Structure formats: C-alpha cells, structure tokens
Image (cartoon, rainbow, N blue to C red):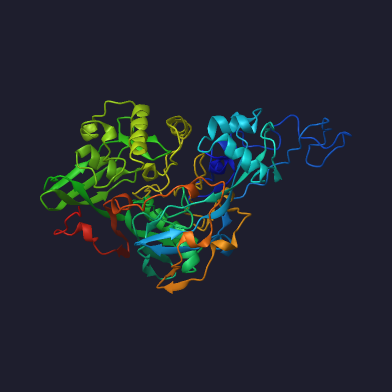
Amino acid sequence: MELADVATAAPATVKSSGSAEKTTTKDATETGKRKSDEPDQPETSSRGKRRRGAGGKKLRPGERYVPPPQKRNPGVSFSQEHFDETSHYFEGGLRKVRPYYFDFKTYCKGRWIGKSLLEVFKSEFRAESIEYYQRAAKEGRIRLNESPVEDLSVVLRNNDLMKNTVHRHEPPVVGRPLEILVDDGEVLVVDKPASIPVHPCGRFRHNTVIFILGKELGISELHTVHRLDRLTSGVLLFARTLETSKRLDQLVRDRQVEKEYVCRVEGEFPEGELICEEPILVVSFKIGLCRVDPKGKECRTVFQRLSFNGKNSVVRCLPLTGRTHQIRVHLQFLGFPILNDPIYGSSAWGPHRGKGGLVEKSNEELLKALVEEHRSQESLHLLDIPDDVGIEQVAEKSRTSEKGDKLDGTSEPNTSGDSHQAQIDTQVPTGCSSSSETVSKVNQACTDINTNDASLKSPTKSNGNQTEDSTPITALGTSDHLCSECKLTRPDPTEKELVMYLHALRYKGPGFEYATRLPDWAKEDWVEAD
C-alpha cells in the first residue's frame, strides 16, 4: 500500500432517502468528535503564546501544531476542474485514461497516534518501499497539515491531516459508448457496458459512468436508484430529481419494482422454474466476498433456463430480495456459476467450488486462497485491490467492516432503498454516493486535487457521445520518475477479464418499464470464442 491509498479516515457523510445520516468510515468517526479528542492541543511557539484553535491552552516549546479538523462536508460536487485532470483515448477496443497527478488524503487513524510516519509506512503501506516514501517526502509530495514533510520520523497526533500526491493510473475499460435509453426529465436510464464502474471507486475515477456522463455529456445532479457491479452490464437507472428519487426508493422498499437479469452459466441448468432461498452472509466487505451461511440474511431468487448450447446455459434471474451478490452466490450454490465470475467461479472454493455450500475452509482461509489464486495469475485487479496488498490488510479490513451491511457496486439492486455510502478505504480510494444525494458528490478525500499536469492533455476529436484522442500515452511524456506503474508494461485486459456474463435486462414498476436489448452472449446460437 502507499500513503496515496490511505484515504480512509477523511470524514464525510451522505444521506439515504428515508433514513438517518450515515458516516462513511468507522475509523474516521470512532469518537464522533475531533476537536476535543486530544487533551494536549498543538503548539504555538517557544514563547508559549496562546494560539487560536489550540483551545486557549499554552503550547509547550517544541510541540508541533495540529490545526483543528476541517468541518465535516457531506460531499463535493464534481466540476470541470475534476474533469480536466486528464484526458482519454481509444485503442484496441478499449477506453484508456492518461495517467495524472492526484492527491489522496486521510486523517490520522487512532492506531497511528504516537507512531512515526516511518513506522506507519512500514506496517501498513507496503505497496511501495520505504525508499520511495523518503524520496517522495524530499520532493514535497507528502504533506502533514498542508506542510511538506521532510523527515519521516515525525510522530503522528490526533487530527493530523496527511496528504500524498501520486501519479495515478486507471485500468482500461471496454470502449463501447454509454447508450441513453430514456431521459425524460424525471429519470435517466442508460445501458451500462461491462467493466465500467458506476461511481469513482477502487482504482477508477475517469473511467466511470458518472465521470463519462458529466464530462462528455454534461449530465450531472443524478440520484442513484440501484447498483450494478463493475463487471455487470445492463439497465442502470438514475433519478433526475429528489422527488423522483424518493418515489422510486419507496417503490423498491415496497417491492413493487420487478427486476429481471439474464446470465450465462456453466453446465446444463435444469429446465423449469428453480427457486433458491439460501441465506447469504458477507465474508469480506473489502473485496466483496459472500457465501451461503445459516447466519446470513434471508434471500430468494427465481431462476428459469432459457437455452442450452451443449456446454453452458442462458438463465433468467428474478431476485426477489436485494442482497450483496445474491444472483452470483445462489448460482454458485446450485452448482452453476456464472461464466467469467472471478470470485464465485474460482477454484479457491475447493473441489466443489461452493456447490451445495460445501466449503471446507474458514472465512479467512477462503479469503486468503482467493487472493493468492489471483495473485499467482497476476489478476488481483479483478478483485479491485492493488497487486501488493497482503492478506493481512484484506482480513483486517474485512473484520473492521463487519458492522456494515451494504457493499459498493453490488450486481443486485438494494431493495431496502438505501444506496451505498461514500466510502474511502485504506487500499484504494472508493467513493459512491447516496440515493438522496446527487451522484456527482463524493467524499472530499476523493475529489480534492492540487496538481494537474497540462502535458496530460492534447487535442481531441469527437466520436459520437464520447471524446476520442488518438494520441497514445507514450507520445505525451507523462512518465513520472517515482511512479512504479510507469516502470511496468501491462498487457491489455482480455474480454474474459472485462466481461462477466450477467446483465440487468429489465426494470419494471407501476407505470414504467425500462429494458435493453438482449446481449449477444445471451442469444441461443452464441458460441464462446477460444
């Protein structure tokens, strides 16, 4: 991990329709009060002057002044400043974003208080070497309370605000444009391609639905109604107004919205209607890992086979509840995992691959096996975690997240009506907004940027509803001498890595119905490419 990826503790709050305010991160708000947490507020000068913001106390000579925390901010709207951070281009059927400079920031976590920056880097941020952080500090890229840090031996105190400027690389996504299905002033419905996240999250920011809509189509101030996984395609519904958002949320809560998905699964799925009612438990909020477990939440999914090509089957899915990864987990339990599912089709589950709930591993053993399998295949990006993250960090995040019951980017809609919160985690910046707040808002930690490099931009040309720039990255001189990603040559992702065969086909409620065309892979005569 790197300090750049520490954006967890920055305080931010969003609202969900019909529910109380929710705080995005537990660590950021353990006490719910920052201004009075430290009995000894920071120093002024050696003369012992009283300093405004220091609680009226005299500060001891040599003490470091820690300013009071910034006022909690429910979110910051994306603006042209954010859109101008970088540009994108198309190559080999992929949409690629040029690397750009970005500030990550975090407030000091409770367990860091009294430790030096060097100790924190060694114990928790191991994606980069200590030498990297020392060089970054010398170049002014690491800051504490807005002041550059030259000596990593500085001891952290409560309310310290840490910042790190990094050279950020985003993974490519499919180059297919977003298709607007409906835009009537009340709702916006798009056909989301697979591989594109809805909101800025993980390693994604500009390659997201929200940034594409805002930057290239000028569409903002949207309210989420439901969620789709990054690898899932299909109907994605936004409300244009708060009133519409509340009305749709209530319909979802009352289970008056019918949701229909289609998927392609391994093997010959049974004919007729098949109902699965196994309870689902979240094992890891960090990577979004769930399993069937008696301690889980009640679930109900109706399945019906549509076709079988001799090797795999197309299945219609009707989730009657909205649990995390519900469709994927139930199909795994039935023994028919979705094709290209990097989690529930994994051999890490053992010889039965989770069929019938047979998993002869503890949750931590399962988590470790899954991470190690993808690490050995150099495919950790499919779990949306950095390559150098250890199982210890993943397990720790899983334990600290157990009190939550929602996961960002689930493939099934949230039938409780609560949309996922803006959230920043210790590995990578994530940020997803609430259904009652606009989706153009996320946590301050994700949106602040102090450094933009004009060299990242170049002339563009129009390409339908997207902006295409045909100049490749290597021609722009965007390499950064401290950036480890710049030293790597990664192959382009394959279709198997970008597309999971799960598609939100239709959303239907009182007085409305929104549907997409059937994906090519769901047609009866489709044959998987070698």
Q: Name the side, left or right, on which 488 lies relative to 499.
A: right
Q: Considering only vertical position in the picture, is 379 above or below 38?
A: below
Across and down, in percent, residue 16 comes to 49, 50
Across and down, in percent, residue 267 comes to 15, 44
Q: Name the side, left or right, on which 274 lies relative to 15.
A: left
Can residue 304 be seen by looking at this rendering?
Answer: yes
What residue sits 69% from the left and 35% below the top? 151
Q: Name the side, left or right, on which 137 lies relative to 47.
A: left
What residue sits 25% from the left and 45% below the top? 301
Foreground of the two, 197 or 275: 197
Across and down, in percent, residue 499 comes to 30, 53
Across and down, in percent, residue 320 comes to 28, 47
Foreground of the two, 525 or 423: 525
Can residue 240 be seen by looking at this rendering?
Answer: no
- Quadrant of the image occupied by residue 147: top right
Q: Name the side, left or right, on which 530 lies relative to 379.
A: left
Q: Residue furthest right?
A: 47
Q: How many marks?
A: 0
